[in-house]
Every structure is written in C-alpha cells, then in structure tokens.
Image: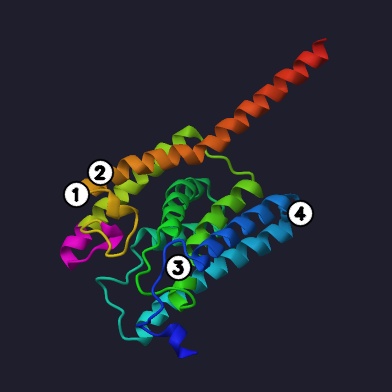
C-alpha cells in the first residue's frame, strides 16, 4: 500500500496513455451527468449539499497533498506553498461553491478552467504515473476546478459576460506581480514564472524564458475567448427563438 504514497516510483506518467485518457473520459462523464440532472440539482437543499460535497473534496485533496509532502519531510516554502495556479484556482473554486460570488465565478471559469484543462491535457507529473497517489491527486484537483465552474453554469445558471474575460485576465496579471516578487525573494518558481517545468508540457513548445510567458498571455486570451463561445451561441439561439416566436405571433 505504501508504494502508492512513496516519494519515488517506477511508474512514470505517460502522456495520452490509457489511464490518462480514461481519466479525461471520467471528467467528461461527470460534466454530462451534471448537465442531464441539472433540474433536479437546482432544488435548494440538493444544490447546497452538492456544492458542499464538491468543496469538501477539493479541500481534502489539497490537504492530503500537503500531508504527503510533510510525511516525506519534503515540505518546503520554496516549492509547496499553495501558490501554483492550480492551487490558487482550487481555493477560488472552494470559495465560489461556498459563497456563490459572481466575481469568483468569473475568475474560476476563465482562469481556473482554462489552466486546469490545459494541465490535464499535458500534466506536469514526472515520475508519478497511475496508480500513484500523486496521479489521483492531480486529476481530482484539476478536474474539481472544472466541475465547480461547470456546476455553477448548469445548475446555478451563472453566465459570464464579455467583460468577464478581461476582468479575469487583469486579475491573473495583477496576481502574477506579487508571485514574481516572492519567487525572487525565495528563489522559487511558483506559477513557472522563472523557468519551465522539467516535464513535457505545453510550456515546452513556447520558447525560452521569458518568451514563453508572453506566449502564455496570448494563449490565455485565446482560451478565455474559446470558453466564452458557448455563451455567444446561446445568446444567438435565444435571440433567434425570440424573433421566431414574435413573427409567429404577429402572423
């Protein structure tokens, strides 16, 4: 049993392996299930319980991650503070589920979902492949962020505006400033602002430092707009239906 929680392992993560693709399919199945049962989930008591359960899973996932580092005596202020974008997004998702603040939804949907999705497609897991604890932690944490934002859309009927894109983008860049300064002070690399990860991720293909940081800015804007596309189509559909109903009534 302890081999699943060991610090070193021989089960290296393989990109687009069967466990990787199967995990992505599970996430898709969870999202589809939320969409199918959205009306039932809208009951006040049910929605409250589900939101608390998702938030609890996220909190326990993050807590277990730190316990794992502490158990192996590897917890370090330069590497383990919850200042990676995934940890920040997870914390925002928890507060979103508990408070239902629209501003937190805007940030979680665009920044959290975009970064979590990209991370799940090209994970920075190194030697921690299936069935190691780190494998499960990574995908539960990142998948939970996406599920949280999707739940607020499907069940709570939250819809971002076009301005939400730029609010999220500005918030992300404002947060980068103190993280960058802290990296300099601690000689750390939170949010990969100082160097790319060793694993083969999206950053691998975006050029050297600091070029890849500028590339990420463009990718963020593109990703945010892609995430906004479903809401544009929804507006067009609703407008078309309203026009059709009005025409039918007048005739």
Image quarter hosting the C terminus: top right
How far, Cα to Cα, is label 4 from label 1?
A: 48 Å
Mark 4 or mark 1: which comes first in sequence? 4
The residue tagged 2 is 214
Q: Residue at x 46, y 78 (%)?
A: 132
The reply to whether the C-beta atoms of the residues labelled 3 and 4 are less than 8 Å apart is no
**Residue pushed farthest bottom?**
1
Provide residue 27's location: percent of width, then percent of height: 57, 59
Q: Residues within 10 Å of mark 4 (few under 14, many from 20)?
A: few
The reply to whether the C-beta atoms of the residues labelled 1 and 2 are less than 8 Å apart is yes
Mark 4 or mark 2: which comes first in sequence? 4
The reply to whether the C-beta atoms of the residues labelled 4 and 1 are less than 8 Å apart is no
116 sits to left or right of 124: right
The residue tagged 1 is 210
Provide residue 113's location: percent of width, then percent of height: 47, 51
Residue 40 is tagged as 4
Q: Residues within 10 Å of mark 1 (few under 14, many from 20)?
A: few
Q: Residue at x 77, y 20 (%)?
A: 245
How far, Cα to Cα, is label 3 from label 4?
A: 30 Å
The residue tagged 3 is 138
Q: Is residue 125 magenta?
A: no
Mark 3 or mark 4: which comes first in sequence? 4
The reply to whether the C-beta atoms of the residues labelled 3 and 1 are less than 8 Å apart is no
- Which residues are the magenta region? 181-192
122 sits to left or right of 58: left
* Vertical arrangement, residue 72 with respect to residue 25, above or below: below
How far, Cα to Cα, is label 1 from label 2?
A: 7 Å
């Amino acid at each position: 049993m302890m081999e699943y929680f060991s610090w070193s392992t021989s089960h290296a993560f393989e990109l687009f392996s069967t466990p990787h693709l199967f995990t992505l399919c599970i996430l898709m199945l969870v999202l589809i299930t939320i969409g199918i049962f959205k009306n039932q989930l809208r009951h006040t008591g049910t929605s409250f319980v589900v939101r608390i359960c998702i938030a609890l899973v996220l909190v326990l996932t993050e807590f277990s991650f730190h316990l794992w580092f502490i158990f192996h005596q590897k917890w370090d202020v330069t590497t383990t503070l919850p200042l990676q974008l995934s940890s920040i997004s997870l914390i925002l998702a928890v507060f979103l589920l508990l408070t239902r603040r629209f501003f937190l939804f805007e940030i979680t949907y665009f920044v959290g979902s975009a970064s979590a999705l990209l991370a799940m497609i090209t994970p920075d897991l190194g030697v921690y492949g299936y069935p190691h604890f780190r494998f499960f932690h990574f995908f539960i944490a990142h998948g939970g962020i996406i599920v949280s934002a999707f739940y607020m859309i499907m069940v709570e009927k939250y819809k971002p505006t076009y301005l939400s894109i730029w609010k999220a983008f500005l918030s992300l860049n404002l947060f980068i400033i103190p993280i960058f300064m802290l990296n300099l002070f601690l000689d750390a690399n939170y949010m990969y602002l100082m160097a790319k990860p060793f694993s083969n991720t999206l950053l691998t293909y975006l050029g050297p430092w600091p070029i890849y940081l500028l590339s990420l800015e463009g990718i963020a804007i593109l990703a945010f707009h892609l995430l906004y596309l479903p809401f544009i189509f929804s507006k067009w559909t609703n407008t078309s239906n309203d026009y059709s109903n009005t025409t039918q009534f007048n005739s």
